[in-house]
Image (tube, helix red, strand yellow):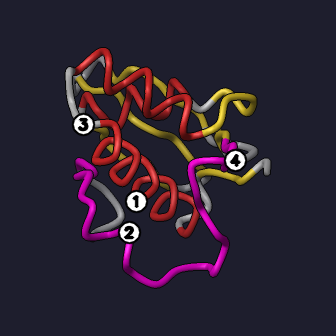
Amino acid sequence: MSGEGTIPISGENAAAGGTGVAVTGATVARLARGVRLREDPVRGQTVLLAPERALALDEIAVAIVKALDGTRDLDTIAADFARQFEAPQGQVLADVIAFIREFSDRRLLEIVR
């Protein structure tokens, strides 16, 4: 993926390489230090701002980032999304885990535990 753009969420990314940090349903994550979620009124999008870069996020990515409060684990977040979107919890969890892996590899998220 390029350094800027909408971030797709796909279960395929879960099998991709990365930092080697194990991400499971018990994982707790939050935005990394210096990373902020902001509305970009010029583009009409929500963006994730990090030092010297910005990523436009789609609605699902924004929902995930907002849910990452550093206290709730991914199982809890996935259960909430599964109810909200009437989707299979296992697939939601796989997608959230893939997202966490990708964004932690990019140093936009940090694993709390």
Seen in the image, is 51 located left or right of residue 91?
Answer: right
Query: Tag on residue 14?
Result: 2
Rounded to the nearest angstrom, the CA distance separating label 4 from label 3 is: 29 Å
Please state which amino acid type lies under the numbered disc 1: Ala
> Any magenta on residue 73?
no
Tell me what residue is drawn at x 67 percent, y 29 percent. Answer: 72
What label sits on residue 98 in the rendered view? 1
Judged by depth in the image, the label closer to the viewer, 2 or 3, is 3
Q: Which region of the structure is painted magenta?
A: 6-29
Task: Check disc 3 and report its element: helix, strand or loop.
Answer: loop
In the image, residue 7 lies in the stretch drawn in magenta: yes
Image spot of residue 1 (x, y percent): 27, 70
Q: Secondary structure at mark 2?
A: helix
Question: Would you identify the image quadrant in which residue 40 lies?
Answer: top left
The residue under the point 57% across, 48% down is 25
Q: Earlier in the sequence, mark 1 or mark 2?
A: 2
The three-letter amino acid code for the residue at tag 4 is: Ala
Disc 1, SS: helix
Circle nearer the N terminus (2, 3): 2
